[in-house]
């Protein structure tokens, strides 16, 4: 008779200890969460600054060292009647009022420049048609606090606008754009936080039919998210962690936290329904679902760790935050969940929901999935080929995905500042997104005629008569030069202007000055260098993720075919989600419905970030289902029987988990921030594909075609240590009556 392979003893031991010491475990978990919050609060404070890669990053570092603030802001003044600055007294009065008001708040606005100052400023700050004027200033104080400091100038400009109803007076610049984006993210995150909890609870109530049972996954996910976000402040002293990381942690933490505990609870309730004692049901749940959770969690964390290979500050915070929250969710699932199940016992079914609460905590075999998978196993090519071709078509479409950042207009879409930036760009091309040239050298050189002559020559080489502005550091060793560029800082015009500046203008001018070092930063430079670094490091990240996932799957399933199949279908699933994201965001479909403005591409970091996250998350269902199939195979069932029974018996929990994950991700599709919309849509689509076409059609079809070859492990790979730590166990009991409803084909 076949024997059931024992799962890793450590998972069973941990679950057994937690069940026996349930109060200690639950109280210990709460103490851990409180400690994480307290420690995180104590560790918060100074954060490591994130820089762009390459030359742009060197310019940003030089800017920080110099103490010069290059957070420039511009106030656009236009007559609503279209009159000229030179002839309209009210127009000139409005400009004068703006300059005077800004100079009255030196703690917020410094180096105020007005077209009324002198003839040179008039030429630089009045548009060619004379109908627009700019008053510019630098946000005073610490650069890192510029998005807060700029609030006072914004309020001042609003007051002047109210005093001059015949004029258009509005402000925009790097600091105000950052403030707007941060406000958008904060508002969207709060909305997602408030929405995700009730949505998840409602879906869990539908899944379990009981309030107590539904509360456990939700509370585990929430506490894991709280701990993950709190603990981020500790590595934040060494690793740059952006404010947007909290959004990503919430997204991933809610998804995996609910999934992991859902898998555990449904398996334990299933075993209880089959007549097992509470202790035995917990043991089986630990050795099956608990093991799957550990394998899945390790795989997700390993995939997320691949982002470190980019050697880019933008990815490091996301990687740290998501690894922390997945680790907390995994730890809670294999400790707190069994403790709560042992503590509550049959009270888990308390608080039944009318109409849906009758025995919903018992996992049942799905008639639909049983029927579908039985037919797929009988005719794998007939069912599997259309699914494969459909996903392949979407994946081929996704190959046309273009990755680049948007300008300020697109990223602040729907806000007044977006229209302000458009008007500024029209009246003063290159003004809203200049290049930031940082020069470092001996103060005597920077004051000398050779350097000043080179700067003047550079200015003459700039197109459209653009004028540069300069600022010197307190010690005189740094010079910050703002160079207007064509375009909006993110389009092809900006890229071409940056290339001309770096390869032609600067080598012909500053390149001949000895004793100085210069680097070009700014929005266009940052995006160009970010894209270059991303292109060179992406193959390394993908290779690492695929190799590590392969090794972990070999260790977990002691097979070659299963890891290769998992990697192939996951790549296909991710590619298909790329196709959907391209169709919506790059091609501009559903703009009104989702509230965004397409700029012909997706945010630059999206493809790699989605690949890493989705490749890790898609392993959740794959590992859970294949673990069930492998369990049945080790009990003596044929591969086809194991596939049908494994998918049918796990389909209820997987469908429920997928529905919840899709719902949580979909909430982010309606955040008022385009990059988070892209993430939400892409991940929701990928999970939906994985839980339907991949799980219901592709995987059963492939496993049916491979047959017993699914379980073969070549001798060359037997060096990989097994996560299962296999040993003989007691003979398995007879199959549950739920599996005997239909005759499973054996050929």
Image (tube, helix red, strand yellow):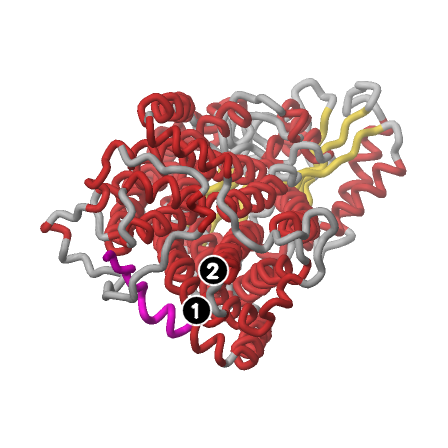
Along the horizontal axis of the image, is 579 left or right of 212? left
**Secondary structure of the residue carrying numbered label 1:** helix
Return the residue nearer the eye: 600 or 732: 732
The local crowd at label 2, few if under 14, some if 14 to 19, many if 20 or more residues have their Cα within 10 Å, is many
Which quadrant of the figure contains the C terminus? top left
Residue drawn at 67 percent across, 44 percent down: 184
Report if the CB atoms under discs 2 and 1 are less than 8 Å apart: yes
The reply to whether residue 455 is in sight is: no
The percent coordinates of residue 720 (x first, y second) are 18, 57
Q: Which mark is residue 280?
A: 1
First of labels 2, 1 by sequence position? 2
Residue beneath the point at 57% across and 74% down = 343
- Observer able to see residue 647: yes
Q: Is residue 388 above or below residue 507?
A: above
**SS for tag 2?**
helix
Of 16 and 88, the residue lying toward us: 16
| C-alpha distance separating marks 2 and 1 | 8 Å
**First to last magenta residue range:** 1-14
In the rendered structure, find residue 570 and report the number of the disc placed on it.
none
Classify residue 122 by image quadrant. top right
Q: Which of 356/94 is in front? A: 356
Q: Position of residue 725 (x, y in %)?
A: 25, 65
């Amino acid at each position: 008779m076949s024997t059931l392979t024992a799962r890793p003893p450590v998972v069973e031991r941990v679950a057994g200890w937690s069940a026996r010491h349930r109060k200690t475990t639950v109280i210990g978990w709460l103490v851990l969460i409180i400690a994480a919050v307290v420690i995180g609060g104590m560790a918060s404070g100074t954060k490591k600054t994130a820089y762009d890669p390459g030359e742009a990053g060197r310019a940003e570092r030089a800017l920080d060292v110099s103490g010069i603030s290059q957070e420039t802001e511009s106030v656009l003044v236009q007559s609503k009647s279209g009159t000229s600055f030179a002839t309209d007294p009210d127009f000139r009065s409005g400009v004068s009022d703006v300059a005077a008001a800004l100079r009255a708040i030196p703690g917020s606005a410094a180096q105020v420049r007005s077209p009324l100052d002198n003839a040179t400023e008039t030429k630089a700050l009045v548009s060619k048609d004379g109908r627009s004027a700019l008053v510019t200033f630098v946000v005073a104080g610490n650069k890192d606090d510029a998005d807060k400091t700029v609030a006072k100038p914004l309020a001042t400009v609003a007051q002047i606008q109210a005093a001059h109803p015949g004029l258009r007076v509005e402000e925009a610049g790097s600091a105000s754009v950052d403030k707007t984006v941060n406000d958008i993210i904060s508002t969207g995150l709060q909305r997602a936080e408030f929405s995700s909890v009730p949505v998840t609870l409602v879906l869990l109530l539908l899944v379990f039919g009981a309030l107590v049972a539904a509360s456990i996954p939700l509370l585990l996910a929430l506490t894991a998210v709280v701990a993950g976000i709190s603990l981020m402040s500790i590595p934040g002293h060494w690793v740059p962690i952006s404010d947007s990381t909290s959004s990503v942690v919430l997204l991933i933490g809610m998804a995996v936290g609910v999934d992991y505990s859902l898998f555990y609870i449904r398996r334990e309730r299933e075993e209880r329904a089959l007549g097992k004692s509470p202790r035995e049901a917990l043991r089986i749940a630990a050795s099956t679902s608990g093991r799957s959770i550990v394998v899945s969690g390790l795989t997700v964390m390993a995939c997320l760790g691949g982002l470190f290979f980019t050697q880019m500050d933008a990815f490091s915070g996301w990687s740290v935050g998501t690894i922390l929250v997945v680790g907390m969710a995994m730890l809670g699932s294999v400790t707190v969940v069994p403790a709560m199940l042992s503590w509550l016992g049959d009270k888990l079914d308390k608080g039944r929901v009318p109409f849906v609460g009758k025995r919903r905590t018992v996992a049942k075999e799905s008639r639909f999935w049983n029927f579908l998978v039985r037919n797929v196993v009988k005719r794998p090519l007939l069912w599997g080929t259309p699914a494969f071709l459909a996903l392949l078509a979407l994946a081929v479409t996704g190959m046309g995905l273009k990755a680049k950042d948007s300008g300020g207009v697109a990223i602040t879409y729907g806000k007044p500042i977006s229209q302000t930036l458009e008007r500024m760009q029209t009246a003063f091309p290159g003004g809203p997104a200049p290049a930031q040239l940082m020069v470092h050298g001996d103060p005597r050189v920077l004051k000398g005629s050779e350097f000043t002559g080179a700067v003047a020559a550079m200015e003459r080489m700039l197109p459209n008569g653009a004028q540069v502005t300069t600022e010197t550091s307190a010690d005189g060793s740094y010079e910050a030069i703002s160079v207007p560029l064509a375009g909006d800082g993110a389009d092809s015009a900006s890229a071409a202007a940056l290339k001309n500046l770096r390869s032609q203008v600067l080598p012909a001018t500053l390149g001949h000055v000895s004793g100085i070092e210069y680097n070009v930063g700014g929005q266009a430079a940052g995006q160009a260098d970010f894209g270059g670094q991303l292109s060179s490091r992406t193959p390394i990240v993908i290779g690492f993720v695929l190799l590590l996932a392969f090794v972990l799957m070999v260790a977990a399933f002691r097979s070659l075919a299963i890891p290769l199949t998992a990697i192939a279908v996951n790549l296909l699933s991710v590619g298909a989600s790329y196709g959907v994201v391209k169709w919506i965001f790059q091609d501009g479909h559903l703009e009104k419905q989702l509230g965004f403005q397409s700029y012909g591409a997706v945010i630059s970091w999206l493809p790699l970030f989605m690949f890493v996250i989705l490749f890790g998350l898609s392993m959740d269902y794959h590992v859970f289902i294949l673990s069930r199939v492998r369990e049945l195979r080790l009990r003596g069932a044929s591969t086809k029987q194991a596939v049908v029974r494994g998918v049918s018996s796990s389909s209820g929990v997987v469908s429920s988990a997928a529905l919840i994950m899709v719902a949580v991700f979909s909430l982010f599709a309606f955040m008022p921030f385009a990059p988070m919309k892209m993430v939400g849509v892409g991940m929701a689509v990928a999970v939906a594909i994985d839980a339907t076409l991949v799980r219901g059609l592709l995987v059963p079809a492939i496993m049916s075609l491979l047959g017993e070859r699914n379980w073969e492990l070549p001798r060359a790979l037997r060096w990989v240590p097994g996560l299962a730590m296999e040993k003989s166990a007691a003979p398995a009991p007879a199959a549950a009556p739920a599996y005997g409803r239909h005759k499973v084909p054996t050929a």
